[in-house]
């Protein structure tokens, strides 16, 4: 049985290339990364897409249970649009593509977009 050894990360101290007896030790500063910009996926109301189809799309692509999907569908219907979820840019773009493809294949004009969360 092979045993993998785990190497410890190298020291956080960097020494200059030349050492003339007066070496200066520099400490590496830890970089703080910002969390990624988040995007909300928004579904738009239309007068043609059946409410039941919208509920099914919300369940299928946004992992909503029937009750939550129905609430979002009613918000879309009453307010003209509704937020389906908040994701990173790539995931939001994929969700929008999935909704548009499913709507197109079913012959519905359902529109979906994503926008940055303020």
Image: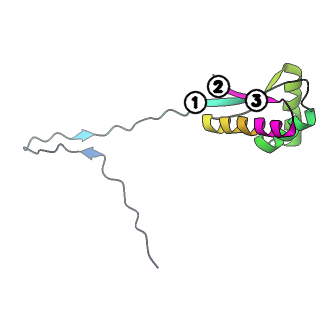
Q: Which residues are magenta?
A: 99-115
For residue 97, above or below residue 5: above
* Depicted 90 relative to depicted 112: above or below: below
Mark 1 closeness class: few <14, some 14–19, many ≥20 residues within 10 Å = few
Q: Which residue is mark 3?
A: 112
Residue 106 within the magenta-colored segment of the rendering: yes
Relative horizontal placement of residue 43, taking residue 55 as reference (left or right): left
Q: CA distance from mark 3 to mark 2?
A: 16 Å
Q: Earlier in the sequence, mark 1 or mark 2?
A: 1
Q: Is residue 63 visible?
A: no
Q: Are marks 1 and 2 in contact (CB under 8 Å)?
A: yes
Identify the secondary structure beneath mark 3: strand
Q: Which residue is mark 1?
A: 37
For marks 1 and 3 on the same chain, the one whose residue lies earlier in the sequence: 1
Residue 59, image quadrant: top right
Residue 103: where, in percent of width, then height? 82, 36
Q: Quadrant of the C terminus?
A: top right
Left or right relative to 63: residue 28: left
Residue 19 visible somewhere in the drawing: yes
Nearer the observer: mark 1 or 3; the answer is 3
Q: Position of residue 67 (x, y in %)?
A: 89, 38
Which residue in the structure is indicated by mark 2? 117
Asked whether the beta carbons under mark 3 and mark 2 sit within 8 Å of each other, the answer is no
Q: Where, by quadrant of the figure, is residue 47 drawn?
A: top right
Image-based side of 14 in relation to 112, left or right = left
| Relative depth, front residue between 69 and 19 | 69
Residue 18, image x and y in percent? 12, 44
Mark 3, residues whose alpha carbon is within 10 Å: few (<14), some, or many (≥20)? many
Q: Mark 1 falls on what kind of element?
A: loop
25 up-or-down from 81: above or below: below
Residue at the top extreme of this rendering: 79
Q: Nearer the viewer, mark 3 or mark 2?
A: 3
């Amino acid at each position: 049985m092979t045993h993998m050894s785990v190497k410890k990360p190298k020291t956080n101290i960097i020494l200059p290339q030349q050492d003339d007896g007066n070496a200066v030790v520099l400490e590496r500063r830890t970089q703080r990364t910002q969390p990624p910009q988040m995007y909300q996926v928004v579904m738009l109301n239309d007068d043609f897409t059946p409410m039941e189809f919208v509920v099914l799309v919300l369940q299928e692509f946004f992992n909503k249970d029937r009750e939550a999907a129905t609430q979002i569908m009613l918000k879309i219907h009453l307010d003209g649009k509704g937020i389906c979820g908040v994701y990173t840019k790539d995931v939001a773009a994929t969700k929008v593509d999935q909704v548009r493809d499913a709507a197109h294949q079913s012959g519905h004009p359902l529109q979906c977009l994503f926008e940055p969360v303020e």
